[in-house]
Image: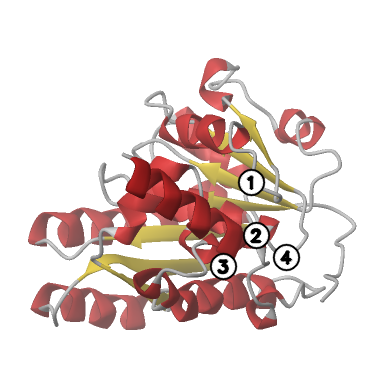
Amino acid sequence: MDSIKNSSPRHILVANAKGGCGKTTVATNLAAAYANVGQRVALWDYDPQASSQYWAEIRQGREEVAAPIEALASFKGPRLRETLSFSRRGSEGCDVIIIDAPSLTTASAQFESLVRMSDIIVVPVMTSSVDIRTSKRFITDLLTHRVYRARPRPIGVVGNRIGSASANYANLEQFLACSGVTTISQFRNTPVYAEAADQGIGVIEMFDNRAARREYRAWHALTSWIDEQTPRKLNVASARPRAVGRKLQQQINTQKNNA
């Protein structure tokens, strides 16, 4: 189905002060999900580790990928003095901009600039006690931050690498309910994410992979929630992955058999 175009791009900030919580996993898979329904997507990597940039470079080198994503190594550009006007210049022609943030405290100047340019904030959280404690503090600091309070925008939490029922995660959900923050999706602890990252693709593009298909509902829930936060909906959640997913999986299987 054809998607509806927004008059201006949406800036989706993927952020958490805790390192290793899955920000890049969420950012790259979101970018792939929107690109596969015909949206023009930019992926801005502000993390000096450049994991999103590396993923994008692998993707650009694949002949079978029919859903291009514009990647920008934003960590190389001006950070502390970055302005909203600068971000808009880099988003010309795009429908969706995914911002992969580094692990920053809410007191940093760079974090403030990223919040200013964002329209929606997605916070990935893992279930260890350390991750839960750090994430709760991050969300509290974000909700009370002067930049956020000057222009509140939707915040959604996604559980990453969720295995069996976790008392820690239940504790987080109780905290979020009291804070008015929505828990959107939970992504399973499955090797399919590492496999997708190694191929420069998103799980939504692994059409013939059973483990990947089990994740579709969670990603559709996340994109649907994001779309509901904007005046003009893109209806990404109701769209099926393009046939390119099948071609990609066939190529992956061929590479494995020839290895």
Mark 1 near mark 4, Cβ–Cβ under 8 Å?
no
Instruction: Please tell me whether residue 204 is drawn above or below residue 109 in the rendered image.
Output: below
Q: Position of residue 188 (x, y in %)?
A: 28, 71
At a point 72% along the width and 65% down the height, the residue shown is 37
Q: Secondary structure at mark 3?
A: loop
Depth check, mark 3 against mark 1: the one in front is: 1
Q: Position of residue 164 (x, y in %)?
A: 14, 79
In which quadrant of the rendered image does the C terminus lie? top left
Which residue is the extreme one toward the right? 7
Q: Secondary structure at mark 4?
A: loop
Which of these two is toward me, 167 or 147?
167
Q: Residues within 10 Å of mark 2 (few under 14, many from 20)?
A: some
Q: Position of residue 151 (x, y in %)?
A: 64, 57
The answer to which of marks 2 and 1 sits earlier in the sequence is: 1
The answer to which of marks 4 and 2 sits earlier in the sequence is: 4
* C-alpha distance separating marks 3 and 1: 35 Å
* C-alpha distance separating marks 4 and 2: 11 Å
Mark 3 near mark 1, Cβ–Cβ under 8 Å?
no
At a point 59% along the width and 31% down the height, the residue shown is 61
Q: Position of residue 120 (x, y in %)?
A: 59, 60
Residue topped by disc 4: 37
The answer to which of marks 1 and 4 sits earlier in the sequence is: 4
Residue topped by disc 2: 244
Depth check, mark 1 against mark 4: the one in front is: 1
Residue flagged by tag 1: what amino acid is it?
Glu
Depth check, mark 4 against mark 2: the one in front is: 2
Residue 176 seen: yes
Depth check, mark 2 against mark 3: the one in front is: 2
Residue topped by disc 1: 64
Disc marking residue 154 = 3
Residue flagged by tag 2: what amino acid is it?
Val
